Amino acid sequence: MLDLDATQLARLQFALNISFHILFPAITIGLAWILLFFRVRYTLSRNEAWEYAYYFWVKVFALTFALGVVSGVTMSFQFGTNWPGFTAQAGNIAGPLLGYEVLTAFFIEATFLAIMLFGKDRVSNRMHLAAAALVALGTTFSAFWILSLNSWMQTPQGHEIVDGTFHAVSWVEVIFNPSFPYRFTHMLVASLLTSAFLIAGLSAGRMIRKVDGPATALVVKTGVGLAAVLVPLQVLIGDLHGLNTFEHQPAKIAAIEGVWETGTGVPFTVLGIPDEEARTTRFAIEIPNGTSLLLTHEADGEVVGLDAFEGAHPPVAPVFWSFRIMVGTGLLMLAVSWWAAWQLFRGHGLSRGALRALSVMTFSGWVATLAGWYVAEVGRQPWLIYGLMATADVVAPHWQATVRGTLIAYALLYAFLLAAYISTLRYMATKPAASLRMLPAAQLRAASAVTER
Amino acid sequence: METALPLIFMAIMGGALLLYVILDGYDLGIGMLLPFGTAAEKDTMIAAIGPFWDANETWLVLGVGVLLIAFPVAHGIVLTALYLPVTIMLIGLILRGVSFDFRVKAAARQKRMWNRMFTAGSLIAASAQGWMLGSYVTGLEPGLVNLAFSALIAITMPALYIVLGAGWLLIKTEGALFEKAIRFGRYAMPAMGLALLAISLSTPIVSETIAARWFSLPAFIGLAPIPIATLAAYAAVYWVLHRAAIARAGYAWLVMVGTVLMCIMATLGLAYSLYPYVVLDRITVWEAAAATKSLEFVLVGIVLVLPFTIAYTVLVYRVFRGKATNLSYGEQNS
């Protein structure tokens, strides 16, 4: 770390911050809709178990949201502290999109979350429902604007450059740029999946420890059902997203697939070790014609290789590996969710093995989401705005010692907070479920005997 | 091309930051006062800000957002110059924001640690904001005098927040905590006065053009209401805090209102001093302004959305009005 130049340090700091940040929206965007679902089920059935589920998970939501807010505030400053050239030259585009995020999302989320958390005895159920719906909409609006900006940086259009400064020509074209619809749906589904595995996994852990109540079973069922439906959908969306990237950012795809030279009938490399100096992939396990088939839907279709972008393509190994971690995690999610769904479908409840598998997969969404973002963001390098603005050209001229010092401070703080977050969730899930109160007294005694063992 | 658009955005930015100072000011103030409460009082103090702090902090994001939207060049300059205090403030805000949630959700034995983090985060954020304000009003120029001035504001700014926090506690609490809040406010007032005085005097001292603009007739007479109103508000707050019987008789809200009035007057004074600069004596609002097309696009959104934002903010303050004694989180565990 000592030999990094200012650009690398600034990137590392921004990457640390944005990686830490995305963990929390990855949960809250999806969890907000799941909370609304719990609230609606409670309203329709008046089954108290749904309300218990709601109040447990709204507290998880609040904690997660707080971590998302504080790390997000940090990001809004780091655009300026780390990349002043970006804000100065592209502020005309980035500013309004971020501004609309603040206006249409942040205030709604923060304000109505208070009603969800503390409004129990102060507002009607209808108002409570409305608050839950507004928070869910707010998180989604937030994703809409920030992903629009990110997508514009990947596939810019609708602008003109006058004296080195970007100006919007058509806001519709800027907002709905080519990669935006794919990235937006991909992220929404990723967040729903992250939350689905979180709620199913924590609840499964609770069942293993025998501190579960009637609400726990409903939560597991919701999580497993959601995951079983959404994982295959995510595979499809991911494929479409990849085709879109192939069209607009071929260098990124070449890095993902490890295609060093342009050619036809390109094989798909399942695993291997990319070696950027020798410009080859060592120990490659290949499927003949695989990449050509995936990207062009023809066995001998032409795929542009990294040789076409000499000196201006992303580092290959991180992109290559991140992609495989994302896909691998996705396949695991598919297997576990279908296995559990099959057991629930047959009506026997979940086996100990399935419960353990779900519990192990609690934070699997984080792994896949982070890996996916590394593919997208490292894959955009060396550009900050694809093809138009190089990352190294807009970095702030800080003392390296300053950046290094603040980087270490952030890293320590984030490691501490992440540990505290995970241990707090685990602690919350080891306490006996409040919905145990719904059980008759005799059963309750038996249940508490188990927990006090 | 000198249109009114950049000025409108300067006003929106100033308004958002002023709202932030007032609203998150009382949150941060209560954070700094937390160690002086008993265990039960601590819970009440937190309950007094629980439903509000999150939205309060969002005004800072809007303020910085408008700086980026409307004055992208200045955004880079200001945040590059304030890199270190900004980073320190962010770490403070992070600690404050997460402690708020962790202290009630983590295991009981950790509660004391999170209470301390809450206080530490609030103090760090308040001081860093003071430093930033001090650097900003002296034109972001380095130098020993400016450094000393920034340090002075960094030390005294927390006092302003403590008076705001005490003012909020006087509205939201009763009994022993109410009495404590009176004392908190009393102790913090002199330092707050120093902060406001220093900020007000700084710009004319730093810049001769500003001095000329203030201390010339007839401008001086036209501007007189600003210092007069500030002094009157200070006297009113002093009076209520030092005659506790008046506070107990139902006039305790005067502390909050008086302090808010002082903040508004200080902001108006600053606005008059700084005009037309975004960065004092360096960049005017027109030089730093974003493209007109971008400003128009955002202004439409602001005009359409901000009234709703203010309306539902008022709604939530109404839902959670009254003394903060029985704020419940709902059921504990599913």
Image: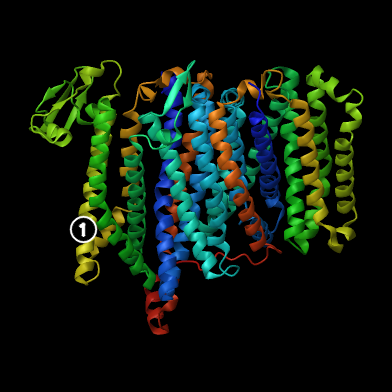
The residue at the point 23 percent across, 41 percent down is: A239
Q: Is residue A255 left or right of residue B298?
A: left
Q: Position of residue B90 (x, y in %)?
A: 57, 37
Q: Nearer the viewer, residue B65 or A323?
A: B65
Colouring style: rainbow
Dot 1 falls on a residue whose secondary structure is: helix
| Residue A19 seen anywhere in this rendered image of the structure | no
Residue A214 on image: x %, y %: 37, 73
When the figure is inspected, residue B75 is found, relative to residue A191, above or below; the finding is above
What is the chain letter for disc 1? Answer: A
Q: Quadrant of residue A339?
A: bottom left
Instruction: Identify the residue shown where x is 57% and y is 63%.
Output: A118
Left-right relation of A181 to B157: left
> B5 or A42: which is nearer to us?
B5
Q: Which residue is mark 1?
A: A338
Counting from the top left corner in percent of width and height, residue A289 is at: 9, 32
Q: Residue B24 location, x and y as percent?
A: 66, 46
Callout 1 amino acid: Trp
On the rendered structure, is A173 left or right of A282? right
| Quarter that holds the N terminus of chain A | top left
Which quarter of the figure is the C terminus of chain A placed in? bottom left
